Amino acid sequence: MNIAYIHDCYGCGVCATACPKSVIEIRLNADGFYEPLVADKTICTDCGLCVDVCSYVNEGLSLKSNFVKSYAAWSNDNNVRYKCSSGGVGFEIGRTLIQQGYKVCGVRYNTAINMAEHYIATTVEELIPSIGSKYIQSYTVDGFKAIHRKEKYLVTGTPCQIDSFRRYVQKFRQEDNFVLLDFFCHGVPSMLMWRKYVAWASEQVGKLTYVSWRNKFTGWHDSWAISIKGKKKFLHLRLSQGDIFYRLFLNDCCLGKACYEHCKFKYNHSSADIRIGDLWGDTYKGDEDGVNAVVAFTEKGDTVLHQCNCTLVEHPFEVVAEGQMKTSPDIPPYAKDIWEVLRDESATITQAISVIDKHERAERWKRRVSRLLQMVGIRYK
């Protein structure tokens, strides 16, 4: 048995990492999401490793633990806290473990090919490109394959990537060498959308040389922003001002099929040692410097947190996870129209935004008519 029958999965790439014959490739499918392809079935020995490590086909979580410690946290280094998307705890974890002899498999954005990719950092300087959130699906294979299982690593990724990776190191009995970190995940958008966004952005600034998601130029609570630098100029685009990428992403209209139907990692469901995110909610609503929501799901994770140059304030999990998604998103009624635009190579991303605008105008009109009819005692359906 091999992974060839799997489609619309998490695209975590761990199957390709585990394959002893290197016959599995991870490619973008027609909708712009990574999925496995068995390139040469004649070489496959049907060892089953690819299926064994697959979080998508295996039920439940790979981590069996009842340990939970939850914190509000932030870096004690003000420069780190300012540069990071939230409180800078992710970077501090990486820096601490590198100083202890670990390597880090993190994610950076590669402007040469306009994609997010996992890579190996062995120094704090090499870790710097991993700073900040990347709100697109990462290509894991090169980074994961560069890992030597008998060495010590911090591995970061989406919850599904981390769950599969834990299955992988469990299979080879090397789990003790790894610290695994994931985050509160909304879902991953299609690379078809991102490519159209890059095409639009390149028209504004020239060939992209720098992309940063979630910076805090105007404060943490208005940090849904993308900064884009090109050969011609620099743009800073905010959701609060109608940024195209965030409108599509946060409207849940172009996420992966697995994000809607098969996600088992929301809220307190994780196979990581540590989960991080933004601590939205009432407790820190007056803080504009950034506060991380941090949850340790293992004693190992909790120990690492207490070794970092961070302030940790323990709270009940409900406080730390306030504002985080508890269930998978629903597919909006106009998603089909959005996908028609994304699949059309000649269409632009502004046409996708027009679909949302049309839907929102119709909804406003329905609400207005409903209020008027209610005023005269007629119920509007």
Image (cartoon, rainbow, N blue to C red):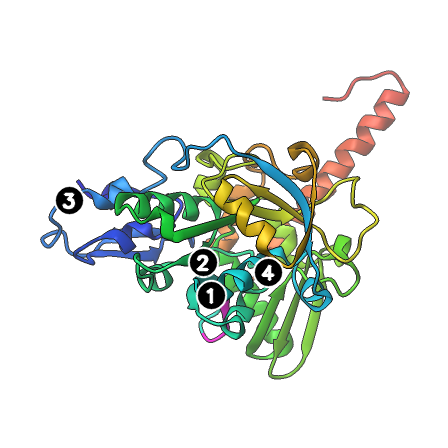
Residue at which label 1 appears: 115
How many residues crowd around disc 4 within 10 Å: few (fewer than 14), some, or many (20 or more)?
A: many
Specify the label residue 138 is tagged with: 2
Sequence-wise first label, 3 or 4: 3
Say left or right for 152 vs 181. Answer: left
Sequence-wise first label, 2 or 1: 1
Q: Nearer the viewer, mark 3 or mark 4?
A: 4
C-alpha distance separating marks 1 and 4: 24 Å
In the rendered image, residue 297, in percent from the top left (x then y), is placed at 52, 39
Sequence-wise first label, 2 or 4: 4
C-alpha distance separating marks 2 and 1: 7 Å
Sequence-wise first label, 3 or 2: 3
Magenta segment's dominant SS is: strand
Name the amino acid type tagged 4: Glu
**Mark 2, secondary structure of its residue:** strand
In the rendered image, residue 246, in percent from the top left (x then y), is placed at 64, 54
Sequence-wise first label, 1 or 4: 4
How many residues crowd around disc 2 within 10 Å: few (fewer than 14), some, or many (20 or more)?
A: many
Quarter location, residue 81: bottom right
Sequence-wise first label, 1 or 3: 3
Specify the label residue 47 is tagged with: 3
User: Is residue 110 shown in magenta?
Assistant: yes
Pick the quarter of the image with the C terminus.
Answer: top right
